[in-house]
Every structure is written in structure tokens, then in C-alpha cells.
Amino acid sequence: MKKILLSLLMAPFLFSERTEELSISPKEEDNFISASFRLWIPNELEKTGDSPIAILVLLPGYNGNGLDLISNPIWRGIAIEKNWALLGCSIQSENGIVNYDQPHAGSGRALEEALLQLGKRFNVDLTKTKLLFFGHSAGGQFGFHFACWKPERTVGFVAVKGGCYNLDLITPEARKVPGLWIIGEKDEKWRQEAVKEIVREGKKEKAPWNFKIDPNTGHEIGKAESYGLNFFEKLDP
């Protein structure tokens, strides 16, 4: 944490302003109607031409625009400390249909294709770079489901106040991926119970999963970024 605070104090000197953005068109069978991504790589890595050790993928709530999430000083601080890149996402499905949170059905392909193309713009290969996920609501559901789909590429995920999870996608390998769910103390009870059940069942199989209560909050982001930061600090890709 001290290193991150130092990074924030030095932000004007360390923060590269260069970002690259890309949109991926859906195929007919895909589960999204639009997908845009914005990549930021720390200045020192860009100077040396080294590849980031991992990429922190940032996703907003349902049909939100998360491209600007890569400008958050909290995430830039840990990215600089750990030599990570940041990827902001804006993925959308038809109104009322929350199915882009299932990466195996097309949206995950869009993310991987974006990393392929964006990596070329930075002259680095990101096709096998490990991923971490921080997502709010449907964005958190995407991160969990990505860990189920490609556990070998997922270092960890933070799912903030979501409630709809496809438990049929969980595999033994997915249960090895560290995960943290954030529950709003005043959020809908069905969301709270859904998360507690997943964690409870996961722990029976020794999954490194936990949940944390965000006091006096509902479905809003609350203090989730702070909890997520502490979680990511302990992970080493």
C-alpha cells in the first residue's frame, strides 16, 4: 500500500497519457451488440518495450461505459507498482438482456481479440498475458465467468455486488482461481444470498473464495475499490 501511495504522489511524472482504443464487431451468434476497449500501459514499460506482467480488466455495471476506468489513480498506482496494464471495457447487450457477462458466448472472444490488436499498437504481445478482473454488478459477473471459462489465464477476480452467476460453468480448475465478492449491506437480499451460497459451496471444495460486506451501502460501488486494491496487492501473477 505504501508503494501505491508513493506512486500516486509521483503520478504527474509516471503516468503516461497514451491510450489506445478499439471496438470489436459482433458475429451473428455473439452475445453482445457492441464492445469497446481502451488500454493503458505504464510509462516505464512503454519506454523499455517490456510486456506488462498482467492486465487488470475493469468493467462497469450493466451496459455501462468503463473506458475511463483506466484513468482512476487507484488502479494506475497498483499498475505502476506491479508492472500491470489496465484495460477499460464497454460491452453491451440488448436492453434488458444481461448475457454479455458470459464470456464463452462471444464477449470473451471480443476481449481477447482486442488485446491482440491493442498489443500490436504498443508493440507487445498480449495474447497470453495473465488477466485480473474488477467488475461492478454485471461486470463482476463477467470476471467470475471468465475465470470459469479460462482459469489458466485468470489470476484473480473481484466481483462487486452482482447476483446472477452460472454455477454450471464452475470447473475444478476454476475453483483454484482466487476470488473476492463485495456485498452491499443494504443491497437486495437475493444478491447477498446468491454470493454467500457460491462462496459457501466453493469453500467446501477448498476454493480460495471470500466475500466482504460493504457497510451501509446498496448496489452502488461504495468502498469496493479499496477492498479490491487490498485483494490485488496480495496476488502475484
Image (cartoon, grey):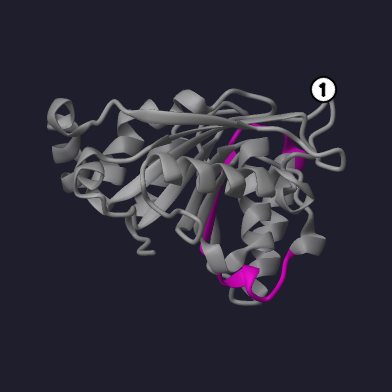
Crowding near the residue tagged with mark 1, few <14, some 14–19, many ≥20 C-alpha atoms within 10 Å: few
Which residue occupies the foreground of this view, 214 or 94?
94
From the top left corner, tell me how far across and down residue 192 is, in percent.
Answer: 68, 44
- Image point 37% across, 27% down: which residue? 71
Q: Picture quarter containing residue 169?
A: bottom right
Which residue occupies the foreground of this view, 113 or 75?
113
From the top left corner, tell me how far across and down residue 107 is, in percent.
Answer: 70, 43
211 falls in the magenta region? no
Outermost residue toward the right in this view: 29
164 versus 205 height, above or below: above
183 versus 37 height, above or below: below
Residue 227 in view (yes/no) = no
Residue 4 in view (yes/no) = yes
- Image point 25% across, 31% down: which residue? 16
From the top left corner, tell me how far across and down residue 152 is, in percent.
Answer: 56, 69
Which residue matches tag 1? Answer: 95
- Image point 68% across, 49% down: which residue? 109
Q: Picture quarter containing residue 163?
A: top right
In the shown orientation, is residue 146 left or right of residue 165? Answer: left
180 falls in the magenta region? yes
- Name the quadrant of the C terminus: bottom left
200 versus 24 height, above or below: below
From the top left corner, tell me how far across and down residue 202 is, in percent.
Answer: 66, 68
Give the residue type at disc 1.
Answer: Asn
- Image point 49% across, 61% down: which residue? 128
* Circle 1 SS class: loop
Residues in magenta? 170-190
